[in-house]
Amino acid sequence: ELRDSTGILVASNDNWKDSPNKQEIIDTTIAPTNDLESAILATLEPGAYTAIMRGVNDTTGIGLVEAYDLDPTVDSMLANISTRGLVQTGDNVMIGGFIILGEQSQEVIVRAIGPSLPVAGKLADPSLELHDQDGALIASNDDWRSDQEAQIIATAIPPSNDKESAILATLIPAAYTAIVRGADSTTGIALVEVYVVTP
């Protein structure tokens, strides 16, 4: 499901080949590889949107939600992306990927939010890692005030809880991965976010 900032349904899909714009999805060259996967192709007005993934017939499992800007030449850009999910232990942590395009470096702030979420079962103390496309660790943080505090405050979007984590970094064009874990192997619901600081 794709919903706007008021919660109104913009579009929905179950099995991408059933989409009325199936050929347009194919033409993007990034159509899903499995017929049971879903895709929505939409031109959106500036604003906040939410993509919700559910298992058919209340089934559960690990899934991936992606958002691609298909026309970077227009006078708009993806300014922020965030994903909420269950952080467990071992390999079942929360992983968020993003790509910096173009030829210029980009300043971003990556946040791991937990204790300030208004939901039950939230992650009490999230830690955050930022990795490059080869898997090498670029930076890590546990409790955002412990590192880069002044710079993070200057972005005007610091986490609201001291136990939450944040990393401010200037990144060259490439693919990156943010990993959220619970301190001391704790589990719970968390949010991983990436904001563009200097568009």
Image (cartoon, rainbow, N blue to C red):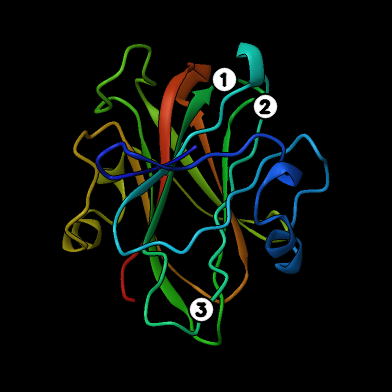
Q: Nearer the viewer, residue 62 or 91?
A: 62
Q: Is residue 88 above or below residue 192?
A: above
Answer yes or no: do the residues labelled 3 and 2 have beta carbons within 8 Å?
no
Q: Residues within 10 Å of mark 1 (few under 14, many from 20)?
A: some
Q: Position of residue 83 (x, y in %)?
A: 46, 40
* Mark 3, residue position: 72
Q: Position of residue 91 (x, y in %)?
A: 69, 27
Q: CA distance from mark 2 to mark 1?
A: 12 Å
What amino acid is labelled 1 in the image? Gln
38 above or below 66? above
Q: Position of residue 103 (x, y in %)?
A: 55, 87
From what the image shows, is residue 179 above or below residue 77?
above
Question: Of the residues under marks 3 and 2, which one precedes in the sequence?
Answer: 2
| Label 2 close to label 1 by CB (< 8 Å) | no
| Residue 25 visible somewhere in the drawing | yes
The mark closer to the camera, 3 or 2, is 3
The residue carrying mark 2 is 62
